[in-house]
Amino acid sequence: TGHFTYDPGFTSTGACESKITYIDGDKGVLLYRGYPIEQLTLDGDYLETCYLLLYGELPTKAQKQQFDRHITRHTMIHEQMTRFFQGYRRDAHPMAVMVGTVGALSAFYHDSIDISDPHQRMIASHRMIAKMPTIAAMAYKYSIGQPFIFPKNDLDYAANFLHMCFAVPAEEYKVNPILARAMDRIFTLHADHEQNASTSTVRLAGSSGANPFACIAAGIACLWGPAHGGANEAALNMLAEIGTVDRIPEYIARAKDKNDPFRLMGFGHRVYKNYDPRAKIMQQTCHEVLQTLGIKDDPLLDVAVELERIALSDEYFIEKKLYPNIDFYSGITLKAMGFPTSMFTVLFAVARTVGWIAQWKEMVEDPSQKIGRPRQLYIGAPQRDYVSLDKRG
Ligand code: CMC
């Protein structure tokens, strides 16, 4: 009943009002609460951005201190949660582990969350931001058969995460501050991106009043796909497959061929029809990380730079306004930092958690909020009569 517009992929449907993130896709602008992504990433830190996304304003010094303390107080996960990991096969994809373990948090914090209470919403939000790196690092350690490393709360958010991933018991591990800074930047770049598929999933799941941890697990599931968060993994695999600069034209030709499903991974975006502003910072961070690690000639980087150069001067990509997106350079950077490709999307999930929660919180606090319920164009059989099994031959 009633009139509705058929809009597959929601390319022209605005499903909510939001004060969180602004994107001008034609100009390549991304603002969090009005602040340009470049300034937040290069001059601020990730937890500051988290506070900004959640509460609308940059924190004062005292607020920042208190927020950082709240987050570090919640980094531990219940010891019983560690048993969840043991249930997975060793070769399970860490995103599968993330979907399951984050979903399981909803069992640990179900009765205690009354989402109509702002204080409880705040605690749940802080818990999720704090625990996500711990769970992600555990998923990684489990996959390589190493013991879990406890959070070390005198380290900042990104450094603590690197420590949980790369430290081993009984061995001294010092986090390289430049790499920690790069990690922090990567987190900030991924923190929110308005109504993308996973965020819309979180909003849709949350619109029924579901447990927020379960809603975040739904977001993680959606993020996993190669057209979304899985693109960083796919982009790196593609660069490795191309392998050498001389093979680029062959892949460019395939990407342009209508009969070939191949696409240049890390290229193109639903909203950006200009250079993705995050990709510029990512490219810069990539060079810094490689320099810090003393990697002079990374063949993957050579392929990436040349591929970008050729694509940006090719008519097909110009005409379709296809530019590198954030995933194009993030894979090379993360690989150089020591992460296996299977962890790339996990890192994206850690970083995006704050965006999901900020959007969930905004939705819950919006008095005009209704349960999300798209309509459809039914194209199936018209009404017909049931035929009993013995008459169906
Ligand atoms: N390589 C070659 N051709 C492409 C590409 C590409 N990467 N991306 C889009 N096109 C073409 C596509 O074939 C289509 O051509 P035509 O109009 O002749 O049919 C046209 O450009 C428009 O593409 P679309 O699929 O209709 O656009 P969309 O807005 O539905 O898709 C996208 C956006 C990001 C899914 C797509 O560009 C893509 O698949 N890119 C590769 C995967 C990727 O890098 N994803 C990461 C996105 S950014 C981070 C994130 O969101 O997680």
Image: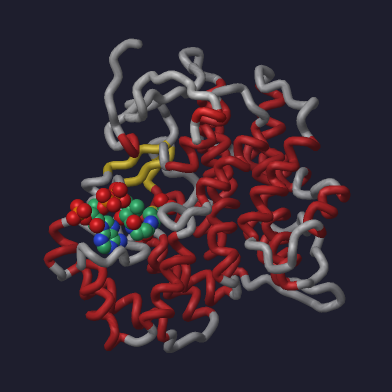
Residue 185 position in % (x across, y down): 50, 58
Q: Nearer the viewer, residue 201 or 350?
A: 201
Tell me if I can see residue 28 in this picture: no
* Side of 235 relative to 350 (left or right): left
Residue 295 position in % (x across, y down): 49, 85
Q: Residue at 80% across / 64% down in the picture? A: 149
Residue 11 position in % (x across, y down): 29, 37
In which quadrant of this rendering is ligand 1 seen? bottom left
Q: Nearer the viewer, residue 355 or 231?
A: 231
* Side of 241 relative to 166 (left or right): left
Q: Nearer the viewer, residue 162 or 137?
A: 137
The quarter in which the N terminus is drawn is top left
Tell me if I can see residue 186 in this picture: yes
Vertical side of 296 occupied by 351: above or below: above
Q: How many labels, in total?
A: 0
Q: Residue at 48% across / 21% down in the picture? A: 386
| Occupied quadrant, residue 274 | bottom left
* Side of 375 relative to 352 (left or right): left
Vertical side of 339 occupied by 379: above or below: above
Q: Residue furthest top?
A: 2
Q: Residue at 44% across / 68% down in the picture? A: 285
Q: Residue at 58% across / 40% down in the picture? A: 218
